[in-house]
Amino acid sequence: MERRITLVNPPYERIAPGYEFVRHVTNRSPSLGLLHLASVARERGWTPVIVESDAESLDAQAVIERVVASRPDVVGITLFTVGVWSAAQVARGIRRALPEVPILVGGPHISSMGRETLERFPDFDLAVVGEGEWALEELLDYYERGGDLARIAGLLWRDAQGVRANAPQPIRKELDELPMPAWDLLPGFPAAYPPAIFDYPRGPVATLAASRGCPFHCRFCDTSTFGARVRAYTPAAVVRMIEHLHTNWGVRHVLFVDDLFLASRTRVTEFCERLLETKLGITWTCTARVDTVKPQVLALMKRAGCWEISFGLETGSDELLRKMDKDARVAESEQAVAWTHAAGIRTKGLFMLGYPGETAETIRMTRDFVRRIPMDIMNLTKFTPYPGSPIYEELYGTKIRPDHWQKMNGMNFVWSPEGISIEQLDREYQALLLAFYRRPRVGKHYVAMALSNPDNLRRLSRFGLGYLWAKVRSLAGGRRGLLVEPAESLS
Ligand code: B12
Ligand code: SF4
């Protein structure tokens, strides 16, 4: 008998109201987690279907219809904090149409807030805390043959007494044993999943995680899904996945989404050497902490196709870095960016604005910093205390907006530090980005990139027109050019 599981990446508020034009230039990567789960289900003889709401522009109602039409025996939904409400709406619709079908949830929000989420949203039946592959195998077994839910590690489930939490899952080290992510099931892959504009030299592009886990404890970061222990695929297995992507879909650029790609320089060295041996000419991008790069490894990475490294630089203030428990200093950030630039690899700086302790002075320091370093691309998020991060515990129940879960996409301020209003932060946000992007060196670089790739030019034009239109609407609506909705306030 055929058994079917439908896996859903639900719709969510990706972009703050007022900033809709940003959609043209942002990242639309698929859920790699669902690709892993789909391949595990297929290996066990189930028929998996994947629904990617954002890439397919599906709203909650369209997702419900798509899921019902797929005639599932089990539904799985991946949850980020920002997507919980719309996922609950989707679950309610599925429940009405298919009352007998169990609805599982998992993902970063569940790893930190699983019990609260199940208690709050009755249409989510079961939840998996942490990695999903091993728990899903056991759950599918349970649906085929029956058994005891209480024995599945990492599972949250319901009985007459309420939500029950099983023992946590053990740390799994054997990533090589996992089946290859099921890219073949992804609707419209790879064209429907472009990365952010200017973030890739040429497509098609795919995401990969070569490792899981991070031993650091930056206070703003949620590491509850993979934990503190770094586990990795062997370099040979990573190269095999790249060859698979290249052969089957012509993928030419890979975005590594690991928390700490450079956790082991020995592993990265072997990966680079093996990738060079393939002679595929693949380019790739990864993230790194500033204390993990050195000129020698950078030179090898460059030869092996590394095109860009994202560094979590966060701020230009040592005092704020200390408050974040970032375990890094501004001087180290500066050194890492300089070395990377000298190696011929582009650098992307990931910054945040509005962390507790942010002041006019720290903002000025960040502005000076982004003006002086040889960085190529700046990504600025609005500080958000995500569930699962140490800072969430500290700030929860203080000045956080009552609807904060729905707004947690890094594009809304849901909290503001003492002495700075959300409106001021929003102005500073725009000013900081302009301070960087108005640098003549940066401007020239982007003009060259836009002209060298028609795709960039098309996306950029749509973004520019959208921005002008948003400004006009804001001025006409009496918001003096501010792009945020006027109703936003803190409780
Ligand atoms: C790549 C990435 C993205 C990509 C792709 C997103 C996607 N849908 O996967 C893009 C750029 C689009 C993105 C966007 C955002 N991201 Co992001 N992103 C990541 C990153 C770096 C890697 C994700 C990944 O592929 N992991 C590898 C796969 C294998 O793991 P996984 O998806 O978690 O799935 C595993 C388990 O969670 C579980 N699982 C997942 N779903 C399900 C479902 C079921 C039914 C079951 C049983 C199990 C299960 O099993 C999977 C296999 O083990 C993570 C950091 C991290 N280490 O995970 C941040 C991270 C997930 N992002 C985060 C955030 C905040 C966002 C944004 C809100 C905005 C922002 N500032 O970036 C948006 C929201 C996107 C959304 N869909 O709601 C936070 C989430 C915090 C939270 N509580 O919500 C993280 C954890 C970063 C952090 N450390 O703070 N992101
Ligand atoms: S920000 Fe980076 S280094 Fe810090 S805990 Fe998160 S993944 Fe680790």
Image (spheres, grey):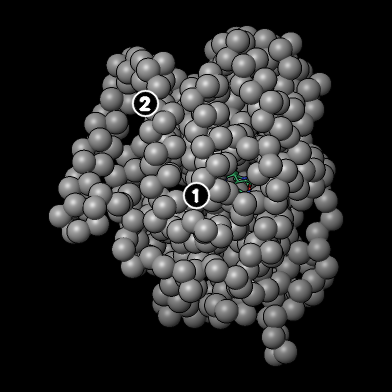
Residue 309 appears in which quarter of the rendering?
Answer: top right
Q: Is mark 1 within 8 Å of ligand 1?
A: no
Q: Amino acid at mark 2?
A: Arg
Q: Position of residue 365 (x, y in %)?
A: 56, 35
Query: Is there CB contact under 8 Å for labels 1 and 2?
Result: no
Please name the residue shown 29% across and 21% down the image: 454
Residue 262 in sight in this render: no
**Is residue 262 toward the left or the right of residue 183 in the image?**
right
- In this figure, which residue is indicated by the disc labeled 1? 382
Mark 1 residue crowding within 10 angstroms, few (<14) / some (14–19) / many (20+): many
- In this figure, which residue is indicated by the disc labeled 2? 438
Q: Position of residue 390 (x, y in %)?
A: 71, 57
How many marks can you see? 2
Residue 23 appears in which quarter of the rendering?
Answer: top left
In the rendered view, tell whether residue 359 sits above or below residue 327. Answer: below
Mark 1 / mark 2, whichever is N-terminal: 1
Label 1 element class: strand
